[in-house]
Amino acid sequence: MTTIYILAAIVLIIAILVVIFRLQVLSAVLKGRYEKRVGIGNDINALLFVIVFVVGVGAFWYSYQQASEFFLPAPSSEHGVKTDQLFWVTMAILVAAFLVTNALLYVFPYIYKYKEDRKAYFYPDNHKLEMIWTIIPALVMAGLVVFGYKEWTAITSPAPKGAEVIEIMGKQFAWQVRYPGKDGVLGNYNYRNIDAVNEFGMDMNDSASYDDFIPREMHFPVGKPVLLNIRARDVIHSVFLPHFRVKMDAVPGMPTHFWFVPTKTTSQMREETGNAKFNYELACTEVCGRGHYAMRFVVVVDEPAEYEKWKASQDTFASLNRDYAAEKAPKLVSLLPAKKVEATEVSAPSDSTAVPADTTATK
Ligand SMILES: [Cu+2]
């Protein structure tokens, strides 16, 4: 208890001293004898401006250094090199402009802090200065816009003839891709045809549908133009192939497209990154619902010969769903490939402990 009394007494004495000091200052001001209008607080505030700027720029540089290990590797596509250039040129210009303007913003309060013997200078306008700081940024911005517009037009222009056409469809919550098969033409689709078997809504009455296949991972040939036809089945998704610097929204009812040329195979990237498990991936960058995070699809870039081999090894949708195709388009049954002899029937192991397939089926 005594301690509390002592502490209370100390606080009281300090408070009384402060009040006495303030009263002295006030009486001096009233009598016209008080001349010093600002104390040391003004100098401290002015210095704090400079400190905030220096510490801020230091923190900015530090965060950049720390984050750089998560930056994407060099682009794996032709246009990606230009996209990166555009990004870094824009970034350099913005950082330079930020540093210059903010250095002035933070250093001027220090240089021009209040001084007893200095009078403020009235400086209403300067047309020359305003012209300079309007015209130079306008020219720089126009340059960036022209550079960006040129790249954007190249990406969204019609793909070169002979490009590999691949359809990507986003749905809650997975990507599905469809390849046109041997004829190089994707069969028609209609959302009315979508059901439990036919997720793409493929039109089985279109003969071009019969060699289309729907693989579990996406393959691209290296060095050849690839055209992505993009659509969505429910909400807006966004096709994002970060290593190729490809990004395009997948919008229901409004097909979009993007063409590009992959320049590095998966095995080249594995060597380059020193990561034997490296895989290119397709992600969704539109927050499309609860399972958004799960929209990952593996992408493999092959040498053209390997790519053709992979394509030839894929079973077509029609051959995997013969009864469905026959039911939907009885007239086109002749287009169905001959039934394959089931490899498992021929080479099934004679191991009697093997579990028969049908007992594992969910009833
Ligand atoms: Cu999505």
Image (cartoon, rainbow, N blue to C red):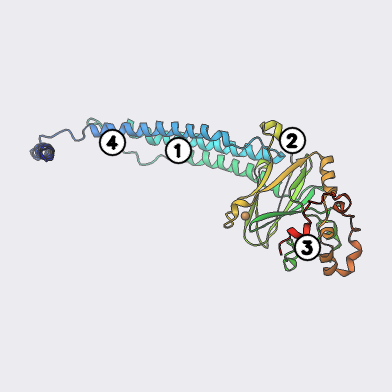
How crowded pointer 2 is (Cα within 10 Å; few <14, some 14-19, many 20+) is rated as some
Gap between marks 4 and 1, in whole Å?
22 Å
How crowded pointer 4 is (Cα within 10 Å; few <14, some 14-19, many 20+) is rated as few
The three-letter code of the residue at mark 1 reads Lys
Q: Which mark is residue 128?
A: 1
Q: Toward the viewer: 266 or 158?
A: 266
Asked whether, in this view, residue 222 is left or right of residue 346, the answer is: left
Gap between marks 1 and 3, in whole Å?
65 Å
The three-letter code of the residue at mark 2 reads Ser
Q: Is mark 3 within 8 Å of ligand 1?
A: no
Q: Which mark is residue 267?
A: 2
Residue 166 sits above or below residue 266 on the image: below
> What residue is pinned by disc 4?
120
The three-letter code of the residue at mark 4 reads Ala
Position of residue 295 measured from the top left corner of the image (x, y, whole percent):
64, 52
Q: Secondary structure at mark 3?
A: loop
Marks 2/1 in contact by CB < 8 Å: the verdict is no
Q: Toward the viewer: 272 or 87?
A: 272
Mark in front: 1 vs 3: 3
- Residue at image position (34%, 38%) is 123
Q: Toward the viewer: 69 or 184?
A: 69
Q: Secondary structure at mark 2?
A: helix
Mark in front: 2 vs 1: 2
Closer to the chain start, of discs 4 and 1, is: 4
Closer to the chain start, of discs 3 and 4, is: 4
> What residue is pinned by disc 3?
202
Gap between marks 2 and 4, in whole Å?
68 Å
Q: Secondary structure at mark 1?
A: helix
User: Quarter holding the C terminus?
Assistant: bottom right
